[in-house]
Amino acid sequence: MKTLFGKSSLFPLLAVILLAAPFQPAHAENVTVRLRNAMNTDPASGIAATKDYLAKNPNYTISGRASLERLVALTYLTKLNDAEGGLAFLDTSMAEVDKAKPGAAQDLARVILLNARSRIYTEQRKYQEAVDLVDKNLPVMLKVNSFTFLDGLTIYGKALDQLKQGQKMIPVIQKALVAYPELMANSWVIGQLVNNMVAQGNGPAALGYAKLSWMVCPFDTKSISTATNLLTSTWFAIDLNAGKGNAFLAAQKDSTTPNPLTDIKLPAVDKTALDTALADLPATEPRSHPKTPHVFPKLLDFHFEVEINVLETVNIAAVGVNQIASARAPRNI
């Protein structure tokens, strides 16, 4: 049997590897990978090594620490079947975050740990606790980045599904789309919003978001197909027939064909809040994470300002100069 400090334990070896050199921020990702692998291989030893590493590297960034602490808490849950141990560890970690200097770094660390707690609650089937945690901390979740927010939103959505309260996703996602405009290109987020609006009987609003999603989706076959399916299925759910959806599809092949999409009004948003979010969004790179689909500020700002009748120039803004040629392909709206 492996013991924590016995000869067969990974802890002494990990301690030598991880603590031999001072921590350098550029190596944070490698450290995280090594510690994650250690916890997967020998959970108890990996947890011990991670705790020791953090104790001996007090200058590790607060968000970096929170990311490792999240891994420890979830290892308690998934590898040791010890949800309460994970929650207790998160209590200690959050107490340290609370002592940190207020600001963006503290906010990010707090949300990372909150997401881990929500995840444990859902695995314990404490769905209401998970929902209450997000509801209480939504303001800070809307201040971090879309990648970390989306992690929490996914857990929140799972808990709401179990409680049959999916309609609570509507105002949360609406706020998120203003705080993180890039999420407009996330098909899961928009699908949750649109489908719950349909379930609530708010067809016009659902179609408005489905239209906007189609207009700003990444310009590739899969993304366009997903956004198109959302539009046509929303029409069908509202009208109980495929007439408008078929007319829309026909208009994509023949620009002279009347298109029912032109009758749909785009959603209204808080212009001041949107401008603030757009000001934070870089012109060429995603704000939060390389894998997050990016919606360019000019595109989104233009969409919310006016109804668009010609998409060609907007697509150029949407996909960037390297894809201008493909963006010139017509999409009749």
Image: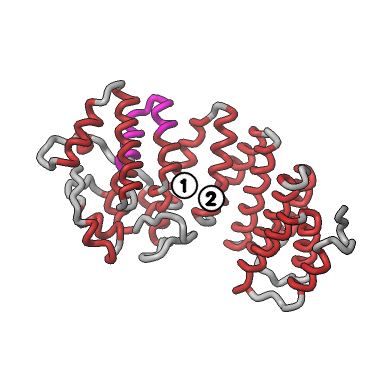
Residue kind at label 1, given as amino acid type? Ala
**In x, y percent, where is residue 15?**
79, 69
Q: Which residue is mark 1?
A: 176
* Residue at 73 percent of width and 45 percent of height: 77
**In x, y percent, where is residue 32?**
65, 63
Q: Residue furthest bottom?
A: 21
Q: Which residues are magenta?
A: 195-212
Q: Residue furthest left?
A: 256
* For residue 15, side relative to residue 124 (left or right): right
* Residue at 77 percent of width and 46 percent of height: 80
**In x, y percent, where is residue 148?**
55, 53
Mark 1 vs 2, N-terminal side = 2
Q: Is residue 148 above or below residue 265?
A: below
Q: Residues within 10 Å of mark 2 (few under 14, many from 20)?
A: many
- Viewer-side residue, 332 vs 250: 250
Q: Residues within 10 Å of mark 1 (few under 14, many from 20)?
A: many
User: Could you say whether the residue bearing mark 2 is in a helix, strand or loop?
Assistant: helix
The residues tagged by marks 1 and 2 sit, at their Cα atoms, a distance apart of 9 Å
Q: Which mark is residue 149?
A: 2
- Viewer-side residue, 77 vs 107: 77
Residue kind at label 2, given as amino acid type? Phe
Q: Residue furthest top?
A: 240
- Viewer-side residue, 160 vs 179: 160
239 in magenta? no
